[in-house]
Image (spheres, rainbow, N blue to C red):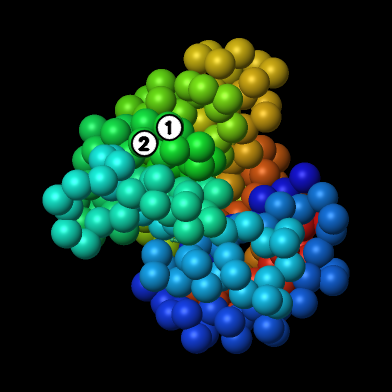
């Protein structure tokens, strides 16, 4: 089973969302693959209600605040996203961490809120180029995982991880399948230490960073890569479908 997720970032308002689902053809996608789209918050309801959306394509929210409600202008809560029909939530995406300065502590608080609201969290981790050059990949991704893991593993507890090296996001530069596998094995090892081997095996670990139809099959075939989190190439229905079809 593979998870193919599209993070639309700040693209596709309601009108474009309807057009996307009108054109998305997932006939060639293996029945065992799980499909998730993360539209901008203002487009979640439209995505959920789009008459042409195949119910196999689930909808998630890209970011939430840790409080359920209150005086937080511009923010979206997990409960509200759930009410709008989202069933997944990204946490700690590299743009949240590096563009908006989100800390590990804030990420952990968001993880708790997402779990409490009954959404399935997808925690993103990943190192910058400087951190990679300094040999700190494992230290960085384990620190990011450790900060939220306690919350993620609480409750009924399904959650996913996404390894997204910051230097590979939106750059056309993709980690090699071996780089991805190495980082995923590090994450899996920590999950095994904390949750035990059988629970750890059930946590899908996705790779993200310049995934496209041309490289999806080899990344998805790499050991310990259970799916992909796709940015730019998920915006067009044809390329999202082509990546998802490579998950067979
Ligand atoms: P790109 O696929 O555009 O590199 O973005 C990756 C990403 O950040 C997905 O969350």
User: What residue is shown with label 1?
Assistant: 116
Mark 1 touching mark 2, by CB under 8 A?
yes
Left or right: 69, with 127 as reference point = left
State how many labels appear. Answer: 2
User: What residue is shown with label 2?
Assistant: 113
Q: Viewer-proximal residue, 233 or 150? A: 150
Q: Position of residue 98 (x, y in %)?
A: 24, 54
Q: Is residue 152 above or below residue 135?
A: above
Asked if the beta carbon under badge 2 is closer than 8 A to the nearest atom of ligand 1, the reply is no
Q: Viewer-proximal residue, 57 or 176? A: 57
**Quadrant including the N terminus:** top right
Q: Which residue is found at the position 50% from the left and 42% from the top? A: 119
Asked if the beta carbon under badge 1 is closer than 8 A to the nearest atom of ligand 1, the reply is no
Left or right: 9, with 108 as reference point = right
Q: Which residue is found at the position 84% from the left and 58% from the top? A: 30
Q: Position of residue 159 (x, y in %)?
A: 55, 35
Report, in whole angstroms, how far the alpha carbon at label 1 lies from the one at label 2: 5 Å
**Quadrant including the C terminus:** bottom right
């Amino acid at each position: 089973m593979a998870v193919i997720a599209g993070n639309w970032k700040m693209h596709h308002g309601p009108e474009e969302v309807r057009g996307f689902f009108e054109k998305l053809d997932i006939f060639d996608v293996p029945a065992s693959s799980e499909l998730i789209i993360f539209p901008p918050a203002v487009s979640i309801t439209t995505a959920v209600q789009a008459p042409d959306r195949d119910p196999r394509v689930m909808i998630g929210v890209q970011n939430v605040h840790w409080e359920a409600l209150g005086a937080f202008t511009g923010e979206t809560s997990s409960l509200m996203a759930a009410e709008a029909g989202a069933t997944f939530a990204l946490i700690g995406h590299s743009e949240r961490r590096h563009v908006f300065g989100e800390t590990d502590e804030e990420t952990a608080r968001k993880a708790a809120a997402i779990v409490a609201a009954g959404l399935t969290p997808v925690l993103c981790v990943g190192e910058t180029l400087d951190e990679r050059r300094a040999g700190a990949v494992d230290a960085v991704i384990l620190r990011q995982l450790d900060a939220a893991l306690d919350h993620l593993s609480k409750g009924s507890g399904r959650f996913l991880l996404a390894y997204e090296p910051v230097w590979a996001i939106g750059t056309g530069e993709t980690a090699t399948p071996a780089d991805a596998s190495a980082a995923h094995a590090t994450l899996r090892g920590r999950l095994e230490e904390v949750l035990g081997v059988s629970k750890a095996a059930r946590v899908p670990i996705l790779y993200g960073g310049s995934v496209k139809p041309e490289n999806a099959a080899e990344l998805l075939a790499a050991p310990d890569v259970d799916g992909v989190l796709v940015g730019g190439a998920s915006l067009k229905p044809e390329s999202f479908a082509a990546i998802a079809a490579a998950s067979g």
